[in-house]
Image (cartoon, rainbow, N blue to C red):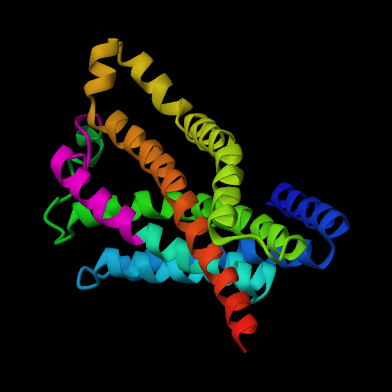
Amino acid sequence: MNTLVWLAAILCILMVLIGGRKGARSFIALFLNFVVVLITVILMLNPHNDPIILTLMACIGISSINLFYINRVNSKTGTAFVSTLITIAILLFLIYLISKKTTIQGFSEEEVEEISIFSLYIGVDFVKVGVSMIIMSTIGAITDVAIAITSPMREVFLHHPHIGRKELFCSGLNIGRDILGSNTNTLFFAFIGGYMALLLWFRDLSYSVGEIVNSKVFGAEMLTIFCAGIGIAIIIPIASGINAWFLTRNRDKQQIL
């Protein structure tokens, strides 16, 4: 426990020294996001609550904290927030169809022995739970890419106020292309690092490559990685288009007036 406190204190000091007030807000946002996730999990324990609806509410809360609390309410955070919600809605529909088609929900055969003493008739839709897990795994990366696009686009517009909507949109796409590869690789290695224990488990079970690829637990983890990458790719044109439309629309209105 003392080690965790010291690590948290070091992180707080570094974030405040380097990031100033915004760094302090970012540190507080970590705990606020943890509270949102914790409340969501507690509410999901009630079988009468829909996990997908709870996840959508949690995504709205997390997005609001990451965007509005850390970066304040302005045009770049507003368009990033709208872009995030649209991307989550598209991903939710896509992930639900894929999860139902691939039947990766529930427990894998490797876990049956550990839960054999428990009843599986608990009245929970594991498809919705699986969808909720994937969405919660991608929301942080999606909001990060959204603000990483809208913020420099706003700077481009401020320095070139007469830029056209199409040119501004292309600038957003160019920014997105630069961060697409790095963010997808960051997600990939983050997930793989967390799944090292899974790979060691497969080794202990003497699984062949074919058995690993066809196992449910491996498929579920790879699906999470691919869906996160798809979310990052989708939000780039969405955030670029919405932000370009919003910025040029306000300028055109002022010119008319």
156 relative position to 177: left or right: right
Q: Is residue 102 magenta?
A: yes
Q: Is residue 65 above or below residue 90?
A: below
The percent position of residue 105, horizontal first and vertical second, equals: 21, 44
Q: Is residue 57 above or below residue 123?
A: below
The percent position of residue 3, horizontal first and vertical second, equals: 73, 47
Residue found at the very far bottom of the displayed protein: 257
Is 100 or 237 nearer to us in this picture? 237
Residue 188 visible in the snapshot:
yes
Q: Which quadrant of the figure contains the C terminus?
A: bottom right
Query: What's the residue at 30%, 16% (across, down)?
Result: 205
Residue found at the very far right of the displayed protein: 17
Residue found at the very far left of the displayed protein: 121
The percent position of residue 11, horizontal first and vertical second, equals: 77, 52
Is 60 or 36 nearer to us in this picture? 60
254 relative position to 82: left or right: right
Query: What's the residue at 77%, 65% (across, down)?
Result: 22
Q: What is the total number of numbered labels drawn onto the structure image?
A: 0
Q: Quadrant of residue 99?
A: top left
Q: Is residue 137 above or below residue 162?
A: above
Residue 207 visible in the snapshot:
no
Q: Which residues are magenta?
A: 89-110
Query: What's the residue at 73%, 54% (across, down)?
Result: 8
Q: Is residue 143 magenta?
A: no
The percent position of residue 84, horizontal first and vertical second, equals: 46, 61
Is most of the magenta stretch helix, strand or loop? helix
